[in-house]
Image (cartoon, rainbow, N blue to C red):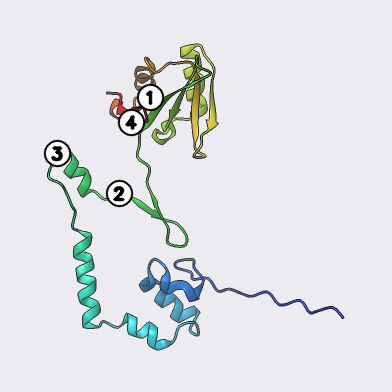
Amino acid sequence: MAAEKPAPVRVLYCGVCGLPAEYCEFGPDFERCKPWLRAHAPGVYPDDLVAASSSSGGGDKDVDKVGERLQGVAISDGSTSAAGDASASKPEEVKRLPGGKLKKKEKQEVVIEKIVRNKRKCVTVVKGLELFGVKLSDASKKLGKKFATGASVVKGPTEKEQIDVQGDISYDIVEFITDTWPDVPESAIFFIEDGRKVPAA
């Protein structure tokens, strides 16, 4: 006699944070989930838990106030310049992914790295042009024509596309990039030398 197949479990996902309803309290913003939980999943959380956490107790208010004040505090060592203070006061743009994970916005910079292989052959790798709105396929064609060498768009070790140019063209590439694409400032171009990022300007 064959065993009966178990029925699949139906999981109710929160419409606010995307987590299963019973895990909302561990998610990024339980306060925003509470109205949705009251309307769509009344049996998941006891009413007293949702009501108690949403009612304004004196202790909770104090904790919230202290938390808000701490978010506005920054630590500095006093050696930063005025430009550093301006960038420190401006928070980085952060995107929220499903499940409450945070995704930081990438810095707009072009990184040029020279990789030596087989003791003589060089490959110049250009990363980050796409952040300035440059099509990598067009850029690789222009680089190949300008320097009379092979250039191709490949996926790098971090699964991001980059341009590989055969040969050592690092001596002239900064001027070519700033002339061809005026949106790319020279201050945003960096070389990688001995594992360190060095500004091109």
* Residue 197: assigned label: 4
Callout 3 secondary element: loop
Label 2 close to label 3 by CB (< 8 Å): no
* Residue 161: assigned label: none
The residues bearing labels 4 and 2 have C-alpha atoms spaced at a distance of: 21 Å
- Above or below, comparing residue 87 to residue 48 in the picture: above
Residue at 49% from the left image edge and 27% from the top image edge: 163
Left/right placement of residue 105 relative to residue 65 reads right
Residue at 20% from the left image edge and 75% from the top image edge: 62
Q: Earlier in the sequence, mark 4 or mark 2?
A: 2
- Residue labelled with disc 3: 81
- Residue labelled with disc 2: 92
- Residue labelled with disc 1: 181
Q: Earlier in the sequence, mark 1 or mark 4?
A: 1
Q: Nearer the viewer, mark 3 or mark 1?
A: 3
Callout 2, which amino acid? Answer: Glu
Callout 4 secondary element: strand
Q: Earlier in the sequence, mark 3 or mark 4?
A: 3
Q: Which one is in front, 120 or 125? A: 120
Callout 1, which amino acid? Answer: Trp
| Position of residue 63 measured from the top left corner of the image (x, y, whole percent) | 23, 73
Q: Earlier in the sequence, mark 1 or mark 2?
A: 2
Q: Nearer the viewer, mark 1 or mark 2?
A: 2
Callout 3, which amino acid? Answer: Ser
Callout 4, which amino acid? Answer: Lys
